Image (spheres, helix red, strand yellow):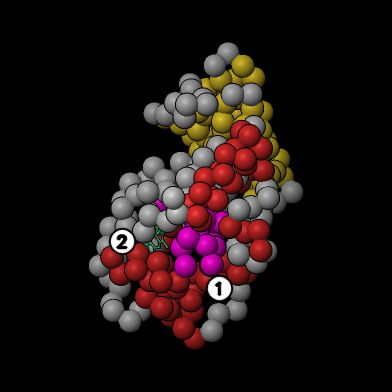
Amino acid sequence: MNKSLFALAVLATLSAPAFAHQAATPFYGGQTAASGDLHVEFAIRDGGLRVWVRDHAEKPVAATGKVTLLLGGAKSEITLRADGDRLVGEAPVKTADKVVAVLALSAGGKAVSARFAQEALVQPALNAGASVGQGLFAANCASCHGPSLRGTDQGPPLLHAWYAPGGGHDDTQVLKVIGNGTQGHMWKFGDMPKPEGVKAGQEKDILAYIRAMQAANGIGAAPSAAMPAMPMDGHAGHGGHTGH
Ligand code: HEC
């Protein structure tokens, strides 16, 4: 047996129990928290909130509830309504905002509460390449990855530890995806189609923009970024990312 593979397998076994009661893998780019054997995934979109409740087997669990939102010094209460396998709520919130959200849900006959926080988006100064990339991103990528790179209902956040530089999605991989798209493998959004509006040679400017945004927003800044220590954003259950 390949030695490094063996080491990985042992590591996975040892670390599994430590994660069991922290967080599940997010399906839709949100933050996750566990309550008993239920997992809550929470995502902020421009103009609304999304909540998914799943059991230990990742099966959706019907839920009702509300979210208390702390936003710009004001507190508001958003009632969630069922929408397929998720709960949604309209709120005057942006993916770029600093937000604290406290969820009070009833799921599977139990009261479930969870607290999530998001920092305000930092817009860094951009060099020439990255600012060209910013325009290309707005035109070709933001519809799915969001104007703040924090995701939408169509695609995942790129300001996410899974995409930190030096991780499984290094520069080569990101350039390849910008050129070709990718099959869905990390989330439940489905495939990313080939970005037809991007011309050969423009990929590196888009990459420069993504890396500048990540650096300014603490993605990949700490050595532990690939496996964040924050329990609300764990990496549990994701079986590595060597399949590219
Ligand atoms: C139509 C929606 C859509 C558009 C437009 C789009 N993406 Fe994606 N992208 C996705 C989805 C969905 C995934 C997640 C696939 C998965 O499950 O891993 C993704 C994944 C990625 C990833 C991670 C790739 C990996 O190897 O896991 C990167 C980087 C990325 N997109 C960058 C971009 C950039 C840059 C653009 C613009 C040039 C762009 N995307 C345009 C939907 C989109």
Query: Is residue 202 left or right of 171 when viewed as pictured?
Result: left
SS at badge 2: loop
Question: What residue is rendered at 68% in x and 50% in y?
Answer: 229
Above or below, 70 against 180 in this view is above
Query: Is residue 200 left or right of 167 when viewed as pictured?
Result: left
Label 2 or label 1, whichever comes before in sequence order: 2
Badge 1 amino acid: Ala
Callout 1 crowding tier (Cα within 10 Å): few <14, some 14–19, many ≥20: many
Bounds of the magenta segment: 153-170
Q: Can you give x and y, in whole percent of width and height, for residue 140 in the image?
A: 35, 66
Whether residue 115 is visible, yes or no, is yes
Question: What residue is rendered at 51% in x and 40% in y?
Answer: 237
Q: Can you give x and y, in whole percent of width and height, for residue 47 in the image?
A: 51, 47
| Frontmost residue, 115 versus 58 | 58
Residue ID for mark 2: 181
Above or below, 184 against 219 in this view is above
Residue ID for mark 1: 212
Whether residue 31 is visible, yes or no, is no
Badge 2 amino acid: Gly
Q: Main secondary structure of the magenta part?
A: loop
In magenta stretch: residue 156: yes
Q: Farthest residue to the top: give it.
A: 109
SS at badge 1: helix
Q: Can you give x and y, in whole percent of width and height, for residue 157 in the image?
A: 49, 55
Query: Is residue 136 left or right of 39 when viewed as pictured?
Result: left
- Give the quarter of the image for residue 221: bottom right
Q: Quadrant of the C terminus?
A: bottom left
Question: What residue is rendered at 67% in x and 43% in y?
Answer: 231
